[in-house]
Image (cartoon, grey):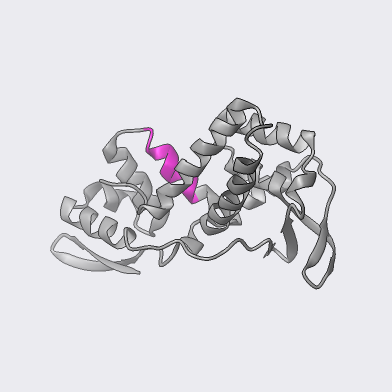
Amino acid sequence: MKVKIKKEGKKKTYNIVNSWDEVTIEKWQQIVLGKKKSKTAEAKETIKALSDLPMKLIDAMALSDVATIFEKLSKLQMKGKLKKVFEIDGIEYGFLPDLDEITLGEWADIEHNMKEGVEKNMHKIMAVLFRPITSKEDKMYSIEAYKDGRERAEKFRKKMTIVQINQALVFFWTFGSEFAGILPLYLTKQMMKLKAEISLAQNGAGSV
């Protein structure tokens, strides 16, 4: 989307995101971590993450321009179903094929990353849920055995979109709800928090 900002009596056109498919984990983290600051700082971080406006201009913007940007952002919609397979830099990644077979080690790392901070560790959580595909036939596939995913997590942070995250968490949350009776209480509560945090995007990226 385009937005016109007036500066020194002249209007210049800038770009803001057209859909949440353009928003990476890194940009999402800027937004949600900005919400822990003042409303002014939150607004700045949101505009910075979702547009190509330079920070100097953001600081000098009229409140009417800020309101216009947030009005446009509020119209963004989050749609679609989970894509269990997606590609980054020529590598296909697949969502855990069978959540019933999730290991204790995988659960432990998800729980650890939640305890350390859901927002800042979202890319690490996704690196547990999505791994390189090792073999594929029609809709069936196998993924790499679980191991250190730090390099993958950093790639996800920069290139995985908030839409993919949202769909994965909704799917994972459904699974977690079904197994709430056997999950540690802390993890169950954190999964509820995670679902609430991701709804940020669906509600228009915050407020001014």
User: Which range is magenta?
Assistant: 27-36
Q: Is residue 195 rendered to the left or right of residue 42?
A: right
Q: Is residue 126 rendered to the left or right of residue 189?
A: right
Magenta region, main secondary structure? helix
Residue 200 seen anywhere in this rendered image of the structure: yes
Queried whether the magenta region covers residue 32, the answer comes back as yes
Name the foreground residue: 143 vs 34.
143
Residue 119 seen anywhere in this rendered image of the structure: no
Quarter of the rendering occupied by the N terminus: bottom left
Q: Residue at x 54, y 50 (%)?
A: 25
Q: Residue at x 42, y 52 (%)?
A: 201
Queried whether the magenta region covers residue 45, the answer comes back as no
Q: Is residue 37 above or below residue 175?
A: above
Q: Residue at x 32, y 45 (%)?
A: 44
Q: Is residue 125 rendered to the left or right of residue 66?
A: right
Q: Residue at x 21, y 52 (%)?
A: 61
Q: Quadrant of residue 97?
A: bottom right
Q: Position of residue 75 (x, y in %)?
A: 33, 63
Q: Quadrant of residue 64?
A: bottom left
Q: Position of residue 40 (x, y in %)?
A: 27, 39
Q: Is residue 102 above or below residue 144?
A: above
Q: Is residue 101 above or below residue 137?
A: above
Q: Position of residue 77 (x, y in %)?
A: 40, 63
Q: Is residue 190 rendered to the left or right of residue 155?
A: left
Q: Quadrant of residue 186?
A: top right
